[in-house]
Image (cartoon, rainbow, N blue to C red):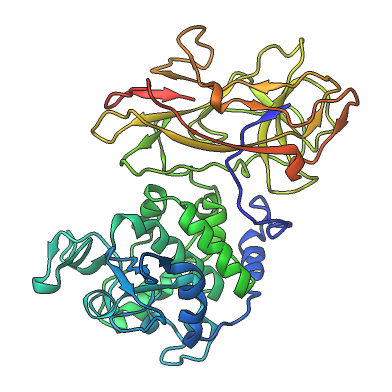
Amino acid sequence: MFLLPVLLWGQGAYYNGIDTGTVTFVADLQNLVSQHTQISYDNFDETNIAFFASRDTTGGQKAVTCVYSGEIYVYTPPFTWIPFSREHTWCHSWMPTHPSTSGKEYTDQHHLFPTNQNNVNGVRSNHPLGIVVTPSGANGTYLEARYGTNSSGQTVYEPRNAHKGDAARALFYMALRYNWTFDYLNNTRLPALSEAPQSVDLLIQWHTQDPPDDWERSRNEYIHSIQNNRNPFVDHPEYVNVIDFNTLTKKTSASPPPPSSGNHISITTSNFSYTENFDGLSNSGTSIPWNDNTTIPGWYSNKNTYDASTGTAISGSAYSFGSSAAIDRSFGSIGSNSAGSIQYAVRFKNSTGSTITTIPLRYTGEQWRNGGNTAVQSLTFEYKINATSINDGSGWVTVSVLDFASPVASASAAPLDGNNSANKTTISSTMSPGIEVDVDSAFKI
């Protein structure tokens, strides 16, 4: 049995009982994230800055980055707030509870970030986030941040590209956590402030183009450690496709994740990041239909069905593995002579405008069954540029450093808990040298 999940961070059992397939999904998720411990606003520097946002430099100094502009503030401890400040991604004036500063919404660290006060925080003010077409005067550009008007002539603030997805997920979290619909924000609150609407479609686009990276996931871990709640859209980016944030209701049919364009995942920038946790797969049943580029957008299999299992199944097939009824899934297979070769792949397209020569990759291989074979079983990692089918018989290039070898190989056949550290291996390497993906070419791995 082999599988290829992307590394999951320390979610543990946090999302147990959350199922996107239920009619109560949004309410269940709201109830989950609403259980949190309030940390004093005044203690943001003693907590988030001290233990997460700051980093050591030289000569005993530390540095903090302005999330909107990319400015690096170097200081000798202790940290002081001038010239930086705490930015409320969901502006204080947007909150129905404004001007109160005593509530959890004001101090919630999931939407608080360090920024330059005068050149960034004060300039952003109450404005919605958007794409600046025409910068406004002296404040129009500060390093990587922009302020001005969008293509409709509306005043907006544009964070640097590296923070756009983070900002979108912070806003989605706040809407969910505090039951603030974007319909209310855009039809009541922002007009009262003489501000333009906050585009949900643009936030979803940013969420797609700038997916969670290691820094954001680590930040989610840290905030969980002190607030005891998580931003679910960092852990499960696919949840965004299930919720209508205008009304905070479940969509009647989930939109496919935007990163998939046509029959591939588009790599649009040099710092592009993509994750897949397979939690959209079924957690029960057999002979579940698999549809290429639909069951998981951008993903392909040479089998047209898959089964769900906890590791007890023995038949050769593609599988959705996980604990009983758990939403946390892994995609893999059990091999057998009757099943033949089982293959699965994800297809990417180079849309960066430049040739790609290096592709870093990391995944966690989990073993959910020991088949009773004392020989180590392996999952072979290959790629092919411009593969027309997953069944192409030639031209695949093996990258052996990315192969997965079963951690357990003994004569006693038995199910295993793939979430147990003894039964999984995190594999990380770079697909280079040798790979060269021309502009507009696609490749499968």
Residue at the farthest front position: 59
Q: Is residue 188 above or below residue 232?
A: below
- Number of dots carrying numbers: 0
Residue at the farthest right position: 412
Residue 159, image x, y percentages? 29, 63
Residue at the farthest top position: 394
- Position of residue 239 in the picture relative to residue 63 (left or right): right
Q: Is residue 5 above or below residue 138?
A: above
Residue 263, image x, y percentages? 43, 28
Residue 207 vs residue 438, the one in the foreground: 438
Question: Residue at position x 62%, y 69% from top?
Answer: 225
Residue 88, image x, y percentages? 39, 77
Question: Residue 419: in sight, yes or no?
Answer: no
Question: Residue at position x 39%, y 63% from top?
Answer: 167
Residue 376 quadrant: top right
Residue 14 vs residue 259, the one in the foreground: 14
Residue at the farthest left position: 137
Question: Residue at position x 63%, y 44% from top?
Answer: 279
Residue 374 vs residue 319, the one in the foreground: 374
Residue 361 vs residue 181, the one in the foreground: 361
Residue 342, image x, y percentages? 65, 18
Location of the N terminus (image quadrant): top right
Question: Residue 433: in sight, yes or no?
Answer: yes
Question: Residue at position x 34%, y 55% from top?
Answer: 162
